[in-house]
C-alpha cells in the first residue's frame, strides 16, 4: 500500500522549486493517517489509516465513508482519470471496482491468486491493468462482469512499473526480471523487448506528446527512449545511492519531475526537476514531508497531516 | 543416471531385488511412496526492489575482513514429488552485515547451478537489518525447466525481532509470508571463529 501510494505521490514543477503555496485547505480526517491519495479531480482523497483501514474523504468538507476495513488487507489503489471510479486490490487476489459517488453497486472479482500490487486505469476508463506479486500483468475489460482481455508474459517477478502512451496504442511494462516490454494494445502482442537494464525499473512515463518514453529505477538514472523506433536515446546522470521511484510532468512538459528514494533506506525521499532540453537538474525544496500529492487542473497539490487534520496546499 | 521411484521399483522387481509379499500392485506401491515423499512448494515472497541480473557464479560471498558473523548457508532443491531438480539455476542476494545492498556491484550476490544432486552451499555473512524491512533475510530466485520460478526469502529464527519465539512473532514482518521460511540457526566453531549454519531446502512447483 505504501508503495502504491508513493508511486502517485509527489509531483513538482520547476516553478515549484521556489514555490509558495496558496492558502491551505484543512480537512478533518477520520483517523491518523500516514498516507493519502488525491483523486485526479481533487474532489476526494483516499485516506490510509494507521490501522490499515481505507476511507474515502470528500474535499473540502471532510465527510467520509469507510471503504475497506483493515481485515480486507488492501494493497493497491487507483482512481480512474476522470475520478469517477476507484479500483482496489487485496492480499487475497481480489479486485474491487466501485464508483466514487452515488450508489452504483461495486464489482469485484478474483483477478489473481497472489496479492494485488498495482492497478492502472486506461485513459478511457474501460480497461484496467492489474499486477499481482510475482505474476504476469493482466488486462481486464471493465464490463458489467469484468473479463480478462490479455496476460502479459514475463520470465519471473511480475511487473514493477507500467505506462500507456497518450494515444492509448502502446503499453510498456517494466518487469521484475528487469526487462522492459512493449505491447500493442490492439493485439496485445509484444512488439519490443529491451533487456539493457540489469536492475528493476520502478517508473515509466511517456512525454505528453507521446514521442519519448522515460524510464527510471534502481540504476538511479532516467533513460530516454524514442517511441517510434524503440531505441534508447540517452541516459541522464545518475544519483549516487538512490533509486528513482516516480517520474511525471506538469504543465511545462520540458521538465521531468523525479522522485528518488535512498537505497540504504535511511534518508527521506528527495526530488529533482530534470530539464530534458539541457539534461540539467534542479533540486526541489519543500519545507515539509508530503504525505500525498497530485496534479489537479495543471497545478500541484501537496498534503501533510497533523494528527487528524489533513492540510492541502495548492502550489502556485 | 537417475530413476523415478516407479522405475526403481520396477527394476528391483524385475531383477528380484525385492520380493513383493503382498498383493498390492507395483503401481500402488509407487504411488504410496510418492505420496509419502510429496512436498509442498516453498512459500513465495516478493522479489524486492534490488534484484540484479548477471551476478557472478561464486559460492564464497564473504571476503576477507568483511564484518558480520560468518554464515554457512546450504540446502537442496526439490520438486513437489520429492525428487531433486538437477537443472535448476539458483540466484541468492542479500545485504551486507550493515543492512546495505550492493547496487553498483555484485557483493553478496551469486548465481549457482547446483547440478545433479541439486545441492548448494555458500559462505556469506549474516545480513543486517535493511531499514525499510523488519527482519534480516536472504533473497532466493530459483528457475528450472518445467517448473514455476520460485521467488522467496529466508529468515533467521535468531532474529531479535522474533523475541526468541518465531512461532508466535513471525507475523511482525508483514512481508514474511510463512513461518516455514524462518529457519533455525546452528552456531558452530570455536569462540573466536564461530559460524552460523543454516539449512534451507527449496521446493519448486511444476508448471
Image (cartoon, helix red, strand yellow):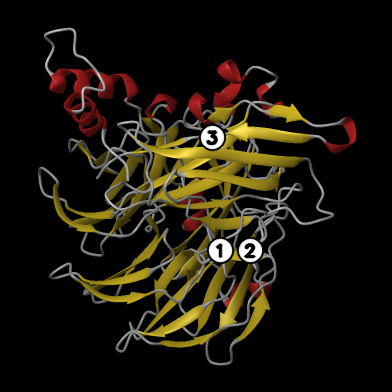
Q: Earlier in the sequence, mark 3 or mark 1?
A: 1
Q: CA distance from mark 2 to mark 3?
A: 22 Å
Residue A162 seen in the figure: yes
Marks 2, 3: nearer the viewer: 3
Residue A249 location (% of width, % of height): 47, 74
Q: Which mark is residue B200?
A: 3
Q: Look at 49% across and 85% down and name the residue there.
A: A254
Residue A250 seen in the figure: no
Q: Residue furthest top?
A: B22
Pointer 2: residues within 10 angstroms few (<14), some, or many (20+)? some
Label 2 sits on a secondary structure element that is: loop
Tag 2 near tag 1, CB within 8 Å: yes
Q: Which residue is mark 1?
A: B55
Q: Which mark is residue B106?
A: 2
Q: Nearer the viewer, residue A185 or B142?
A: B142
Label 1 sits on a secondary structure element that is: loop
Q: Residue furthest bottom?
A: A278
Q: Work out whether disc 3 and disc 1 sit on a shared chain.
A: yes
Q: Look at 26% across and 59% down and name the residue there.
A: A153
Residue B2 lies in quadrant: top left
| A266 relative position to A312: left or right | right
> Quick check: B53 above or below A213?
above
Query: On what subunit does the disc labeled 3 rest?
Result: B
Residue B35 location (% of width, % of height): 26, 21
Q: CA distance from mark 3 to mark 1?
A: 21 Å
Label 3 sits on a secondary structure element that is: loop
Pointer 3: residues within 10 angstroms few (<14), some, or many (20+)? some
Q: Nearer the viewer, residue B41 or A299?
A: B41
| A137 relative position to A29: left or right | left
- Quadrant of the image containing the C terminus of chain B: top left
Q: Nearer the viewer, residue A261 or B59?
A: B59
| A187 relative position to A138: left or right | left
Amino acid at each position: 500500500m505504501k508503495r502504491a501510494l508513493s508511486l502517485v505521490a509527489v509531483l513538482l514543477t520547476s516553478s515549484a522549486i521556489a514555490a509558495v503555496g496558496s492558502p491551505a485547505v484543512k480537512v478533518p480526517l477520520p483517523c491518523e493517517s500516514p498516507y493519502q491519495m488525491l483523486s485526479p479531480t481533487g474532489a476526494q482523497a483516499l485516506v490510509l489509516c494507521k490501522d490499515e483501514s481505507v476511507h474515502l474523504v470528500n474535499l473540502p468538507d471532510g465527510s467520509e465513508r469507510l471503504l475497506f476495513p483493515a481485515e480486507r488487507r488492501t494493497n493497491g489503489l487507483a482512481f480512474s482519470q476522470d475520478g469517477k471510479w476507484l479500483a482496489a486490490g487485496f492480499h487475497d487476489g481480489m479486485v474491487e471496482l466501485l464508483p466514487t459517488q452515488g450508489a452504483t453497486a461495486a464489482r469485484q472479482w478474483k483477478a489473481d491468486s497472489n496479492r494485488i500490487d498495482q492497478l492502472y486505469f486506461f485513459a478511457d476508463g474501460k480497461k484496467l491493468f492489474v499486477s499481482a506479486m510475482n505474476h504476469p500483468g493482466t488486462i481486464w475489460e471493465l464490463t458489467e462482469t469484468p473479463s480478462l482481455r490479455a496476460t502479459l508474459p514475463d520470465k519471473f517477478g511480475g511487473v514493477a512499473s507500467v505506462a500507456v502512451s497518450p494515444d492509448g496504442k502502446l503499453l510498456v511494462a517494466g518487469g521484475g526480471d528487469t526487462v522492459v516490454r512493449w505491447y500493442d494494445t490492439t493485439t496485445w502482442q509484444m512488439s519490443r523487448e529491451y533487456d539493457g537494464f540489469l536492475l528493476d525499473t520502478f517508473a515509466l512515463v511517456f512525454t505528453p506528446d507521446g514521442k519519448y518514453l522515460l524510464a527510471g529505477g534502481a540504476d538511479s538514472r532516467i533513460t530516454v527512449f524514442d517511441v517510434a523506433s524503440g531505441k534508447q536515446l540517452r541516459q541522464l546522470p545518475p544519483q549516487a545511492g538512490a533509486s528513482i521511484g516516480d517520474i511525471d510532468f506538469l504543465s511545462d512538459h520540458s521538465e521531468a519531475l523525479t522522485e528518488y528514494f535512498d537505497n540504504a533506506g535511511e534518508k527521506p525521499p528527495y526530488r529533482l526537476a530534470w530539464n530534458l532540453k539541457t539534461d540539467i537538474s534542479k533540486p526541489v525544496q519543500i519545507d515539509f514531508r508530503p504525505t500525498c500529492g497530485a496534479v489537479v487542473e495543471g497545478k500541484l497539490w501537496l498534503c501533510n497531516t497533523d494528527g487528524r487534520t489533513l492540510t492541502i496546499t495548492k502550489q502556485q | 543416471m537417475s530413476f523415478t521411484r516407479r522405475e526403481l521399483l520396477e527394476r528391483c522387481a524385475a531383477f528380484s531385488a525385492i520380493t513383493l509379499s503382498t498383493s498390492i500392485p507395483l503401481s500402488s506401491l509407487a504411488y504410496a511412496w510418492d505420496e509419502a515423499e510429496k512436498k509442498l512448494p516453498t512459500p513465495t515472497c516478493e522479489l524486492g526492489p534490488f534484484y540484479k541480473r548477471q551476478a557472478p557464479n561464486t559460492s564464497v560471498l564473504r571476503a576477507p575482513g568483511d564484518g558480520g558473523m560468518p554464515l554457512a548457508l546450504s540446502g537442496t532443491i526439490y520438486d513437489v514429488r520429492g525428487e531433486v531438480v538437477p537443472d535448476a539455476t539458483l540466484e541468492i542476494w542479500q545485504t551486507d552485515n550493515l543492512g546495505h545492498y550492493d547496487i553498483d556491484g555484485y557483493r553478496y550476490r551469486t548465481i549457482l547451478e547446483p547440478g545433479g544432486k541439486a545441492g548448494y552451499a555458500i559462505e556469506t555473512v549474516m545480513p543486517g537489518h535493511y531499514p525499510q524491512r523488519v527482519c534480516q533475510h536472504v533473497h532466493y530466485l530459483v528457475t528450472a525447466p518445467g517448473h514455476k520460478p520460485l521467488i522467496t526469502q529466508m529468515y533467521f529464527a535468531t532474529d531479535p525481532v522474533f523475541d526468541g519465539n518465531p512461532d508466535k512473532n513471525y507475523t511482525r514482518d508483514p512481508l514474511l509470508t510463512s513461518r516455514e521460511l524462518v529457519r533455525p540457526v546452528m552456531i558452530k566453531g570455536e569462540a573466536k571463529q564461530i559460524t552460523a549454519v543454516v539449512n534451507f531446502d527449496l521446493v519448486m512447483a511444476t508448471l
